[in-house]
């Protein structure tokens, strides 16, 4: 629905405004709960387990450390497997 305001002279599409607020909230959540793959930059969510990550993107599949962002290696395995 559209609502007109006599003082401003413009109309607001309430549905579009609500959708925009949801999209901004979703973007904020993604930014807080994910890290970009160091190789392809797709957002990756960690939901438990160790720090060893594998990019979910089939074209990438880069294995990396959630803690330091480097390619998964023996140092990561020894120093912060479960940080």
Image (cartoon, grey):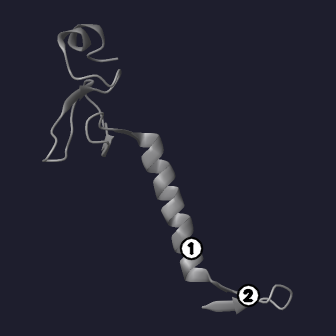
- Alpha-carbon neighbours of circle 1 within 10 Å: few (<14), some, or many (≥20)? few
Query: For the point 64% across and 91% down, which residue is it?
Result: 2
Q: Quadrant of residue 47?
A: top left
- Mark on residue 64? none
Residue at 25% in and 14% down: 76
Distance from label 2 to label 1 (Cα)? 17 Å
- Is 18 above or below relative to 14? above
Which quadrant: the C terminus? top left
The local secondary structure at tag 1 comes to helix
Task: Give coordinates of residue 13: x percent, y percent.
Answer: 61, 84
Residue beneath label 1, please? 18
The x, y position of residue 78, in whole percent, is 23, 7
Residue at 19% x, 47% y is 57
Task: Find residue 10 and name its label.
Answer: 2
Q: Does residue 75 appear left or right of residue 2 in this picture?
A: left
Answer with the quarter of the image where residue 43 lies. Answer: top left
Q: How many marks?
A: 2
Report the quarter where the N terminus lies: bottom right
Q: Estimate the x, y position of residue 65 in percent, counting from the top left.
A: 27, 24
Upstream in the sequence, badge 2 or badge 1? 2
- Determine the residue located farthest toward the right in the rendered image: 7
């Amino acid at each position: 629905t559209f609502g007109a305001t006599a003082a401003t002279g413009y109309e607001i599409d309430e549905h579009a405004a609500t959708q925009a607020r949801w999209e901004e909230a979703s973007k904020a959540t993604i930014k807080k709960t994910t890290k970009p793959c160091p190789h392809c930059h797709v957002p990756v969510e960690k939901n438990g387990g160790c720090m060893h990550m594998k990019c979910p993107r089939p074209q990438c599949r880069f294995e990396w450390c959630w803690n330091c962002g480097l390619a998964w290696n023996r140092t990561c395995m020894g120093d912060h497997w479960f940080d």
